[in-house]
Structure formats: C-alpha cells, structure tokens
Amino acid sequence: MKVTFERVIPNEKSSFRTIHNNSPISEFKWEYHYHPEIELVCVISGSGTRHVGYHKSNYTNGDLVLIGSNIPHSGFGLNSIDPHEEIVLQFKEEILQFPQQEVEARSIKNLLELSKYGIHFHHKVKKAMLPKLRLMLESEGYKRYLLLLEILFELSKCEDYELLNKEIMPYTIISKNKTRLENIFTYVEHHYDKEIDIEDVAKLANLTLPAFCNFFKKATQITFTEFVNRYRINKACLLMAQDKTISECSYSCGFNNVTYFNRMFKKYTGKTPSEFIKDYVHSNGNVDLKVENETKTKVSF
C-alpha cells in the first residue's frame, strides 16, 4: 500500500472539486494519501473500508465522512465490491471567507476544526444530504458554491455524528516515514493470511525489534500486533458480507484457531461473528473496529 500526496485540481470555473465515482472499482486506485483540501465523502450505497488517520473500520450501507486538511486517509472504495457509487467534495478552507461578525458561520468553522479528527455522520444524515449532493453534480457557478455552504451549514448543526480519532494524525508522520510505512503496510497486505513474524517485519524496516515496536506505535498509535489483528478482522468482515462461513473467514485471514478468531472478532467489533452476520450483514448496518475498552470521542459543535 502506497502513501501518497494527492494534488487536487478544482473543476473548471470553480473554486473546489466535485467527483462522481460510478465506475467499476477496478478502475480506481484507493491508496492511502493526504492533501491540504478538506474532503466530504458520501458513499451512496455499498460496503467497504474507511481508513481515516489512525482509525480503520468497515461500513456496509453507504457512508458520509468529513476529513480535515492533510489527514491521511484511503479512498472509500478500499475493499469494496461493485456496484460502488460515491460523491466527493474537495475544497480548501480559504474559499470559505466569512465576516467576523457573522455569528451563523461560527458553527461551520467549528465543524472544519473537528474535521481534523474525521467526522462520521450517521445514516439518516447521509440520507438527508444526498439530494443536495446530487444537485451539486448538476449545478454550476455561484449556485454550486452556495450549495457547498448550505451542506456545510446543515452538517454543522446536526448532532448525529461521531469523531473517528481521539488524536489528530499529523501528515508529517506519514511524509517523513513514507517509504518505511509503505513497505510495512504492503508486507501485511501480502501476508495477512499467513503467520507473520514481527522480527521479519522489523528487518524489512531496517530496525531492531525494540526500535521497530517504538517506531510503529508512535506512527500509528497502536502496536504492530494490534494493527495486524485489526487488518485481519477487517478482511473477515468483508468476507462475511460475501456470505463466507465463519470457519472460512478465520482461516482465510490468518487465524489458525476459530476460537481465537471468535475472541479477536468480539474484541474489535463488539460482536461475535454470528451476531455480526445476523445484526450487521443481514440488516446492512455499520460496524466499527475498535480497541478493547476504547470509548468514542464525542464533541458538540
């Protein structure tokens, strides 16, 4: 998995960029990347992985997330299956200039400040915003800009959201260690279904084992073992969404013991595999991979 800087070019005769992705996912690269533009991602339908800053989780019934400036993230088509459709807005904060006495604009400023943590809006918010986002694709000029303001203002007033990260991930963590992290992430991608020896990964990173453990924890806020377990459980969730059995998911994702797989699955999703299949896959809900005893960060605008 590469970690790249993305150059965002506004649409013609516009101060920001609007993207409508409605092609087969095989035609897109869903790399881990960052850019100075703030990004609003609306996955209209379908399932996949949201990876924003330190946070990684699955969505299974579309998604709506606001990502702050220079926060590393993956494209939401990651681990998705067709059909996949999304609308993405990318804009710089500088285009939102408000007079200081404009009280109504304060909520938007607060919203953009919190976007540095990654904001996941609940399903009913996505449903309410979708008509305006579709209209954005048809609008031009100043009407398009006013629609952006209207969308941001409505999002700033809603309370049905959660912050994806408890800490802001500085993009410098990624940019300064780009090659080393790319090598580690790629190794896990290629070997998650097999036994992974952490000493081999430390050698790959050209670090001693203690130095590697310290480096990885500082860069990602989790241990390497936890990262691998999260990655494997994430893959297992997607396989279950494709009607694979619990046993198939366990062995396909590098767990050689179904009992241990069940325990790790419960730790990171809060559900047993059977409960996940019943409550999430069949009902098209959402599941967040979480650290044991972790609490969600929630702040009012």
Image (tube, rainbow, N blue to C red):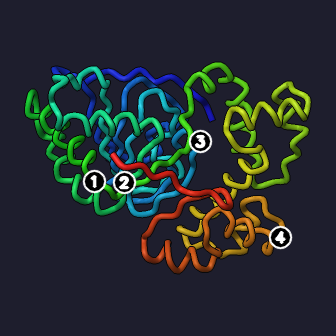
Q: Amino acid at mark 2?
A: Phe
Q: Are marks 3 and 1 in contact (CB under 8 Å)?
A: no
Instruction: Point out residue 125 in the picture as x, y percentages from the top left corner.
Output: 28, 57
Examine the image and state in which quarter residue 145 appears.
Answer: top left
Instruction: Point out residue 298 in the picture as x, y percentages from the top left corner.
Output: 45, 52
Decide which of tag 3 and tag 1 comes sooner along the chain.
3
Gap between marks 3 and 1 measured at Cα: 24 Å
Residue denoted by label 1: 158
Decide which of tag 2 and tag 1 comes sooner along the chain.
2
Instruction: Point out residue 256 in the picture as x, y percentages from the top left corner.
Output: 83, 66
Q: What residue is drawn where x is 11% and y is 37%? A: 139
Q: Is residue 134 left or right of residue 175?
A: left
Note whether residue 11 is visible: no
Gap between marks 4 and 1 measured at Cα: 44 Å
Gap between marks 3 and 2 measured at Cα: 18 Å
| 92 versus 87 height, above or below | above
Note whether residue 112 is visible: yes
| 27 versus 49 height, above or below | above
Gap between marks 2 and 4 measured at Cα: 36 Å
Residue denoted by label 4: 257
Decide which of tag 4 and tag 1 comes sooner along the chain.
1
Residue denoted by label 2: 121
Q: Amino acid at mark 3?
A: Tyr
Helix, strand or loop at mark 1: loop
Gap between marks 2 and 1 measured at Cα: 9 Å
